[in-house]
Every structure is written in C-alpha cells, then in structure tokens.
Image (cartoon, rainbow, N blue to C red):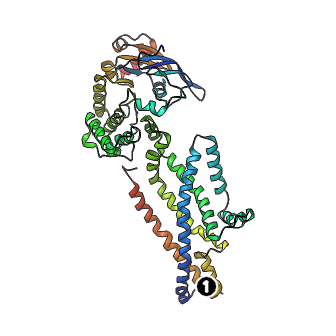
Amino acid sequence: MGFDFNISLFIESIPYLINGAKYTILFSIISILFGIVIGLFASLMKISKNFVFKVVGNTYIEVIRGTPLLLHIMIAYYGLAAFNIKLDYFTAGILALSINSGAYCGEIFRAGIESIEKGQMEAARSVGMSYGQAMRFIIIPQAIKRVIPPLTNEFVAMLKDSSLLSIIAVPELLRNARQLMGTKANVWSPFLGAALIYLILTLPLTRVASVLERRFSKGGV
Amino acid sequence: MEYKNGILHVRNLYKKFEGVEVLKNINFDLNEKEVLVILGPSGAGKSTLIRCINRLEEPTSGEIFFNGEKIDKKTDYNKLREKIGMVFQKFNLFLHLTALQNITLPLKIVKRKSEEEANKIAIEYLIKVGLKDRANHYPIQLSGGEQQRVAIARALSLSPQIMLFDEPTSSIDIELIKDVLDVMKNLAKEGMTMIVVSHEMGFAKEVGDRIIFMDKGEIVEESEPEEFFRNPKTDRAKQFLSKIINI
C-alpha cells in the first residue's frame, strides 16, 4: 500500500466530496439553530430560581454532556425505533445533533448570562422591569456578544462531529470519502480531499465570528 | 391604619444573611418631602436597609409601610419599584444602551410610553441633569459623574415618590462629585422625598432634614443634622465623626 496519493484521483473525488459537504453544512446549520434555541431555554432553566426548572435544565445539560454524541445518534436512529418511533436518517440526525448541541449551547449561554455584572439586573429590576423583561432587554442583549466566540467554536465542533452521522448512512463528507476509498481502492486521495474541505469550511469561521462580534457590540460591551 | 401619615414607615425590621444579623430592629418614619441621610461605618447595614425598601433584598422579618400600605408577598414588586427610584454606587447604567436609551427603555417597557413620548421625557430629564449633549453617548464614553447623573435622570423619569441613593458619590472622581451633589440638592429643593446613604458630610449638613446614624446593623442615633454634627449623643457617633473629620 504505502502513501497512495494520486492527484487525478484527488481531483476526480472532489465533486463527490462536495456533495457530501453539502449534507455536512445542512445538518450543522439546522442543528446549531435548534441547538441555540434549546440551549437558551436550558440555560434559563438552569439559572432559574424555580427548583423544578433548575433540576430539569441541569439534568439535561449534564446527561448530554456526559455521554457521547455517537450514542445520541444511535439512540435517535435505532433506539427510538423500539418505541415505534421510526425516524429516517435525516430526522434522526438533526434530532441527535440538535439535542447534543443544545446542551453545549446551554452551558455557553449560562456562562454568558452569568458573566453580566449583577448590577445590570438590579438596575433593571429597580426601574420596575420584571425578571423576564430584564433578561430580554438588558441581560441577553449584553450576553450575545460574549457568547459569539464560544458559539463559533461549538459550530466548528458540530461541522466536524457531524461526520459521526456516517454511522447511520447519512451521505455526508466523511462517509463519501470512505465510499470513495472503497470504490477507487485509494486511501489518501479522498481523505486528503475531505481534510481540505473540512478546513475550507472551518477556517473562515473565526473571521465570521469576529465580524459578528463587532456587529453585536454596542457601547463597548 | 396607624401608618396613614407619612410616606414610609419601617417597623422592627430584621435582615439576616446566612445567619448573620445585618439589620436589627430598625424603626423609622419618613415624611413627604423629607431628606433623610443615613450615615455610619461600612458594614453598618445602610445599603441593606434601603435595598429592603424597594425589595432588592427581602427582609427576614419586620414591616415596611409605603403610602399607608404594608409591603408583603402580595405586593406587586414591579409596581412598587416604579414608585421608588434607586441610584446605585456603581451607577449600573445599561451598558449596551446610550444615555438616552437608558431612560427611554424603562419608560417604554414599564410605563408603556410611545417612542416619541419616551424620547421627549428622556430629553427633558437629561436637560435637568445637564447632559443633553451626551444623549447619544454610551456609558463607557461618559465619566463617572456623568454616568451617575444619567442614572439619576433614569430613575426620575419614572416619576417616583421616593428616591433612594446608595452611596451615589463613592465611585466618582473627587472633582466630579460636586456635579452629582448639585443635582441631588436641586432635587431636594424641589421637594423630592429622599433617603441618602452617603459619606458626604457637607451634603448631609446642608440638605439633610434628619440624620440616622447606624452601626453594626442598628440605628444608634437619630437627630437633626445641626444637632448631630455639633453635639452627637452617643459615643459611637462621636468616634465616627472624629475619624471622618480627621481625614
């Protein structure tokens, strides 16, 4: 075998890999959006004074973060089928990735919200705002800028970890690379192609993050 | 019933933080248009006391009557706080909003004013504190004194019945304190009912109608400013004043 990189096989495999990358991007974007929404609720529950909310939020975050994503994917696809919930790979994949990233986003939001100085909440309450209004108009707008860098990291992780969806035959980037390895009987050309595409996807994201950070920045906070 | 006269009555107020009593049996009354200055060493419980009034802190026991009505679990705290303005030591302006927006946002959310009305009111109060030209500045672009004046304008814009000041000049550069004190003096002249926790002896003497001296969670002495500074009744107050004057 040895190092079997072949430039023409490499070029030949690019279109098929790009096809896979489309799935990678699609799954990642949809899941991070769901994850952000779930995470926002999870974080608000976790920091709430209501005992039940607190326990539910905390348990969700701890259980998901303490177990592997690959397991979540398998439960969504194979496990739920035992309860007659038969999901196609698309739904199961989105479900698993969203619930997984919801827990990580939850921790990101919690840290972001708790990093806002206590006086901001007190001032908001002192002018007669309710807790919810204070969160919505004062705390969360200030926390957004602070969570952009960790959220970007989370999205980068998602782009890479969505490769685990190959286990349930989602035709994403890494799965397509592996297929090419079989059909072309070549290891290095499709895998280097996949690596290149992952890098093209992930590297610009830090730039995007700093642009977003500046856009959301108001009054230096 | 017995508390119909006067705007605020505090009776047998206690506050414990994790078993430590920070307020012990606090009793006092506040009349309309009165300026009450609370003095005392740090840790005396002055801030905790005024934070109990607008319920940023929940007292452990005791009663507070506002406008003749007892504040308890049934009280709508948000409504209560609309009527009790508070100014903080660290200003606590909303950092993501301009000076103007700091005033308009509560007006819009809490008082349900239209954008236009809110802007009008905000400008009016910014003029009052001498900061109309800073309307579109963010807090970070303002000096401490300016931030505090915006914070005062923000509280005033909701037309409160009482204003609470929690060491309003303690975080401000010494040369900027006067501007803040001037705003407060004008307020007092206009007849605003005020409780001021402060170390500004000049202000207490000049503007205060009454002094409450606190130490270790208790009211040690209550008297007229003239009397308090010239001839304090208690040794603790004497000690405190001698130290302040030595500085």
At a point 44% along the width and 54% down the height, the residue shown is A145
Q: Residues within 10 Å of mark 1 (few under 14, many from 20)?
A: few
Residue that numbered label 1 is attached to: A3
Residue A94 at what x, y percent from top left?
60, 65
Residue B216 in sight in this render: no
In the image, is residue A160 above or below residue B121? below
- Chain holding disc 1: A
From the viewer's side, name the closer residue of B196 and B163: B163
From the viewer's side, name the closer residue of A58 and B117: B117
Query: Farthest bottom residue?
Result: A8
At a point 40% along the width and 36% down the height, the residue shown is B90
Identified by mark 1, the residue type is: Phe
In the image, is residue B229 above or below residue B194? above
Residue B170 at what x, y percent from top left?
38, 31
How many numbered marks does the figure carry? Answer: 1
* Quadrant of the drawing holding the N terminus of chain A: bottom right
At a point 51% along the width and 30% down the height, the residue shown is B57
Query: Farthest right residue?
Result: A82
Residue A132 at what x, y percent from top left?
49, 43
Residue B6 in sight in this render: yes
Q: For numbered disc 1, what is the local secondary structure?
A: loop
Q: Is residue A151 left or right of residue B122?
A: right
